[in-house]
Amino acid sequence: MNYRFQNLLGAPYRGGNAVISQNTQLISPVGNRVSVTDLIKSQTVTLPVQSSSNVCRLAVSPDGTFLLTVDENQRCLFINLHRHVVLHRVKFKYPVNAIQFSPNGKYIAVGTGKLVQIWRSPGFKKEVFALELIRTLADCNDKVTALNWSPDSKYLLVGSKDLAARLFYVKEKLKGVHSNKPFLLLGHRDSVVGCFFGVDKKSGRVNRIFTIARDCYIFSWGYSGNDGKIDEISEEGSEPPSPGTPGKESDGKKRKDFDGKDGDLCEEEYLHKRKWELLRKDDFPQAPAKLTACDYHKGLDMLVVGFSNGVFGLYQMPDFVCIHLLSISREKITTAVFNELGNWLTFGCAKLGQLLVWEWRSESYILKQQGHYFDVNCLAYSPDSQLLATGADDNKVKVWTVSSGFCFVTFTEHTNAVTALHFMANNHCLLSASLDGTVRAWDLFRYRNFRTFTTPSSRQFVSLAADQSGEVICAGTLDSFEIFVWSMKTGRLLDILSGHEGPVHGLAFSPTNAVLASSSWDKTVRLWDVFEGKVNGELMYTIEGRRDIAGGRLMTDRRSAANSSSGKCFTTLCYSADGSYILAGGSSKYICMYDVADQVLLRRFQITHNLSLDGVLDFLNSKNMTESGPVDLIDDDNSDTEEGVDKQTRGKLDYDLPGAMPNCGRPIIRTKCLRLAPTGRSFAAATTEGVLVYSIDESFIFDPTDLDIDVTPQAVDAALNEDQPNRALILSLRLNEDSLIKKCIFAVSPVDIPAVASSIPHRYMQRLIEALSDLLESCPHLEFILRWSQELCKTHGNSIQQNSRNLLPSLKSLQKAITRIHQDIADTCSSNEYMLRYLCSVGAKK
């Protein structure tokens, strides 16, 4: 199976700055990947591009074509957003704290360490040195924290931790290191978090500058000149003088300054500043705060700021009128940004994995997504493969729509970690087991807990299963090594199965009879007839996978990855729908796929290349090992107290728990759960990175099923030209080329569908059903495809029933597509019905 990465669920946001492109495309970093959310279609996609470590900075070009990502290792990727491919790679010498495209899209400003670098933005042309460094500004005394271009891309505002902001005039023809001092904006008592140009709405010219500091104070800088111009210079190619620098003579003429006057540019004569406090101590006395995120919208002349206590403020400038001051989180807001129209505000909280989009005029949420606070323990696909349920150590159960990547309901009734999930066959009931000693049944229509299964004495459940009829519920325990059996209808405890001598971590019912299989830490697998007694089983195959899952070395390992025994064990596995292959994962960076009949490794998936996680590298650099241990485990963070504590806390979220794997805050890569969709076209893995969803690659793969010298694409076209759609369809199925199969399907007229469907050989049924499933998802000819599906079921019903095991994945895909379309049409009809009733009632009143 040619599976490839499709999406990342369970963690919509993990830190860094979010950006909005084309007004509705929300781009946010998720670990070492980037997610793109369409706020109109309510759909999120994770780019199939990985950075070497966690992404900390993003920048998108004004036209939405290019994306820049910078990770914690100062590696930058230049990505084509439309094609989802990496065009260029750059390595910066110092950490990057700010990056931004110029409004004209020609330049890129990068704040790396104390330097500001101006790069020429590459286009679509092939060049040897596409990313060209034009200029380096080396005037800051501490690290750069904020950048902002003027609307005409001539000026650059730079904020830094040295309590000052600087105004640079950017000139392309000057290359190398620029040592002339810029114009200084002084007066702040804390590091500058944001700096912005204010634009006059009538003239469209820049008339003021805003600088915002971490201590919640904002300065508004205005020019006291008559015309108020700061974006024009009298002589082309000249630069603004430094403060206190006497005017220079050039050909008997004095250089003119920003406001068009002759002489020196000094703060007292030409600049005036106003000072406000954004968040006073009496606003939220119980939670004193620092400013952590901000953004300014030039068109609306509005400022949005986020604080470390989870409060955000929206202000109308330049008179500083507070429009909103609300609390949206209990943790620090790490990103705040306007969309292009200024009607939506986006906020992110890294510690909670929370991403919010808020419409400030109507005071309503456009998007509200939050991932699990701790690692995901268990997964479950719905029978139609449209929904995916996740349970985690944060005691929550979330249900996601696989196609959109959105969570639409969260259940919070459990009081301890959720360890197992199971969807019932009716697709509308979900079971969850927890360490709190309960098994709960959830109604996905009314979103409520309608039944709770308990035991006479408190137990900790770690496994869960239900029989095919949905009448019997079984759960295995961690502490008493027993299996409890309940009735779904009455909720009564029916039986307690004893015999294991260790925690029962795996339960599964046979799909054909009432036999229950259980696996335990006592190294045994037992088969139970729930209604009669114990049954016997026979070992058929053994797969040795120690070498297959090997790989990755922990920082604390003294041995190489090849000789280390840690991380070489499987902890989760799942069968495919037809039982032909197995997926297995565990304490490793790999997921292995095995063929059951031949017991051979088919493929190995590496779930991440993120070096921010431990256990990814196979070879460690000996220079990073000291007498005191690995360098990466030594806390030498010299940042201020709040940032340092937050950094340590964020890294230790999941590893301060009793019995967890300690690693001084650096997460270890592993796979806790694997589940294959009933359609067989996708699988999900609960990993340290989140829930990774893999699907079958839809790109063309030449895999003919019955190739002959006469079976060619030209033969298919010839048959179509001769008005022989029956022969053309069979030839395309033998070629197994997706585009040709769909072309031949549409070439059949509706009246000829029964005759053509009856002539299709049985061995091509699976491929034809898969093609119809794909067409139902994408093409508008709904009745045409449904007629094809109906005729296939009529003429090949017996063959489909006899080959149900092999055809099950493709039939499930067809069922999934039909169910989704049915739901969409039902919603549309309901909406139209209510609208017609409303219009009729309004007409009757008139």
Image: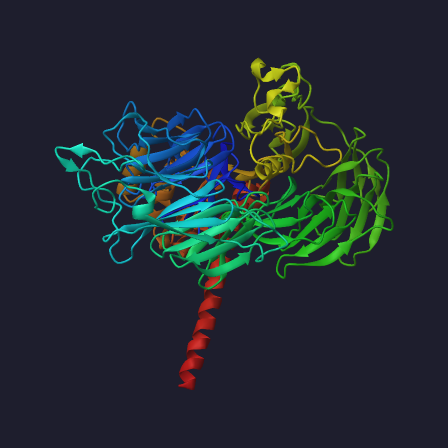
Asked whether residue 41 appears in the rendered view, the answer is no
Q: Position of residue 405 (x, y in %)?
A: 52, 47
| Tally of numbered tags | 0
Residue 564 sits in quarter: top right
- Determine whether, in the image, residue 740 is placed left or right of residue 1: left
**Which residue lies at the image location 79% right of the left edge and 48% below the top edge?**
437
Q: Position of residue 787 (x, y in %)?
A: 43, 54
Colour option used: rainbow
Q: Position of residue 676 (x, y in %)?
A: 59, 39
The foreground one among 391 and 763 is 391
Q: Residue at the left extreme?
A: 251
**Which residue lies at the image location 57% right of the left edge and 25% below the top edge?**
616
- Determine whether, in the image, residue 394 is placed left or right of residue 235: right
The foreground one among 416 and 570 is 416
Depicted 749 relative to depicted 32: above or below:
below
Asked whether residue 724 appears in the rendered view, the answer is yes
The foreground one among 427 and 27 is 27
> Where is the C terminus found, in terms of image quarters?
bottom left
Residue 553 sits in quarter: top right
- Determine whether, in the image, residue 394 is placed left or right of residue 408: right
Depicted 539 relative to depicted 846: above or below:
above
**Which residue lies at the image location 32% right of the left edge and 27% below the top edge?**
179
Residue 499 sits in quarter: top right
Q: Position of residue 559 (x, y in %)?
A: 65, 14
The foreground one among 318 and 760 is 318
